[in-house]
Amino acid sequence: MQTFTPTRTPTWVSGRRLLEEKLSDLHKCANLDQIKQVHAQILKADLHRDLFVAPKLIAAFSLCRQMVLAINAFNQVQEPNVHLYNTLIRAHVQNSQSSQAFATFFEMQCSGVYPDNFTYPFLLKACSGQSYLRVIQMIHTHIEKFGFCSDIFVPNSLIDCYSKCGPVGVNAARKLFKVMGEKDIVSWNSMIGGLVRAGELGEARGLFDEMPKRDTVSWNTILDGYAKAGEMNRAFELFEKMPERNVVSWSTMISGYCKDGDLDMARMLFDKMPVKTLVPWTIIISGYAEKGLANEAISLYNKMEEAGLKPDDGALISILAACAESGLLGLGQKVHASIKRTKYKCSAPVSNALVDMYAKCGSLDEAYIVFNGMTKREVVSWNAMLQGFAMHGHGEKALQLFSRMKHEGFEPDKVTLVGVLCACTHAGFVEEGVQYFYTMESKYKIVPEVEHYGCMIDLLGRGGRLKEAFRLVRSMPMEPNAIIWGTLLGACRMHNDVDLARQVVDRLIQLEPSDPGNFSMLSNIYAAAGDWDSVSNVRLRMRNTGIQKPSGASSIEVDDELHEFTVFDRSHPKSEKIYQMIDRLVQDLKQVGYVPKAYQ
DNA sequence: CTAGGGTTAG
């Protein structure tokens, strides 16, 4: 009997090698057209079912954010092995689709394919930053059951994920870190990073001093700990002492000084740093914007573009958020203009930031234009727009938007309901608000949280239903916080209920003993009741504890410049004229029936 | 593993 022995490599093998090579090249350049071309060749050679070709195809599609095509490539293979599953899981994680990653993981288990050393780190990466504590615990149990801890990458990922899940997670990370036999520099860095996030600065510093070897990441982590705690002197000390500084070290310092309000120092470091990437530019621009220094922020934004740097989504969102916070409509519009100039379409998160910025700056028309121009709206988009209408007293429009949102098939979330209740408050729709509050659980499956109670207390309180508001506070399933009592106090003040106000303010001082506003509120209440002994008592207490009330300031932006003024402010060159104008306005208001509100 | 990142009641 004759046996057939091939004398030369069959053509499909050489063809396959060629394609594989082409695929691994494509992996680097992420060009969808080229991948599609190679894909066609693969189909022609009938290699799409191959267990070595398919993963490369999945990875290439994933890089181009073509998950539909990637999943399709996956489905071509009859019996996927663990490598193929891992590739798909990683693809989902890379495209920030964590739930899809988990679905693939469960599908893999159902098919009887066992996970390996690579599977868990990918899954953990999907958990990282998501606070999926339960899922992480489940993965952890799996790992212990299958004994994959031999690879240091696995416990390191676990420590990182755990330490991003709040106090409970940090505890789990601590425990794991303690029992780990061998630790590398990443294990230490992850643990220290977790402690810094948890605000355990002392413990973090202890570990930092204890670690056998430190790299720049270690230094940056502890630097950030001090910067976030506002201890800039200590941070600077370390910054000067550290053996090597990279962009992250400089950026951490700049960010710290910006948050500390020391923009001169931030700017000095920014000018001095040798390599400026997009992130430090973003930090310094947002820093100026947050402080209301529009001119400086705009000029830096221009300089950044001149330097050839294109803001990414993160930069745009960050700067727009800063504009929203301090009401810098001018800068916000400039950023919007530059987006329109350079981008055909912007992503949903950037549009959301634009809507929020315009809404918070009071330009509802522009907010609504951006909102209506969006092709892919998210619940957040609706929330930002709704909040904008609500905040500026357009309760009717806010509620109309709410109906439209439901009509277009969006599920309201807890933030939406805050917006709806807020809209009812500002438009004076007390009964409607009460209705929404008591039906939100049955209609939308949203259990009222402390924010919703806050809205309700504001709604009832402003409507003069103080007793009801107080009853609601006492019936709350959670502990009322300072905002709740503050809201109730505001209502007491509005309706001159001194007795209730006195009770409320006591609770408020228990919760916020160092807030000067509470003390001056208390003294105002006593003054209104004519209880002058108590007034001087409060003043004395304030002086003894060293509490000082900073005077409140208002601000307005005119021609890209922020003007700030306080009560009895005479610092403006035209203050004579300004006060004349105010007097005239008050006269006019009194004529139409306005009565100034004050305790004394 | 470290720097900037959207909606939340006064």
Image (cartoon, coloured by chain):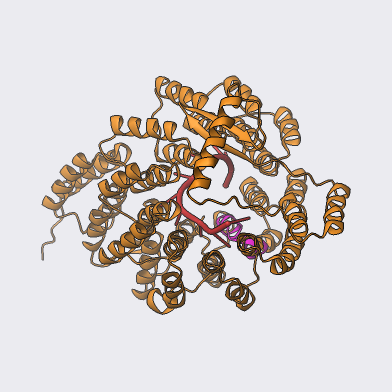
Chain colours: A orange, B red
Magenta segment main secondary structure: helix
A571 or A368, which is in the foreground? A571
Q: Is residue A361 above or below residue A49?
A: above
Q: Could you say which quadrant of the image residue A316 lies in?
A: top left
Residue at 43% x, 35% y: name it.
A329
Give the x, y percent position of residue A541: 86, 53
Front-most of residues A163 and A428: A428
Side (left or right) of A588 relative to A313: right
Which residue occupies the foreground of this view, A93 or A338? A338
- Which quarter of the figure is the N terminus of chain A placed in? bottom left
Which residue lies at the image location 67% right of the left edge and 66% below the top edge? A497
Image-based side of A499 in relation to A449, left or right: right
Q: Residue A68's x, y, as percent?
A: 24, 56
Question: Is the residue A278 above or below the residue A123 in the image?
Answer: above
- Name the side, left or right, on which A343 lies relative to A244: left
Q: Position of residue A225 (x, y in %)?
A: 68, 44
Q: Is residue A167 magenta?
A: yes
Q: Quadrant of residue A164?
A: bottom right
The magenta stretch spans which residues? Answer: A157-171
What is the residue that sits farthest to the front in this orientation?
A591
Q: How many marks?
A: 0
- Residue A64 in view in this figure: no
Q: Which percent across, then down, holds residue A217?
A: 62, 39
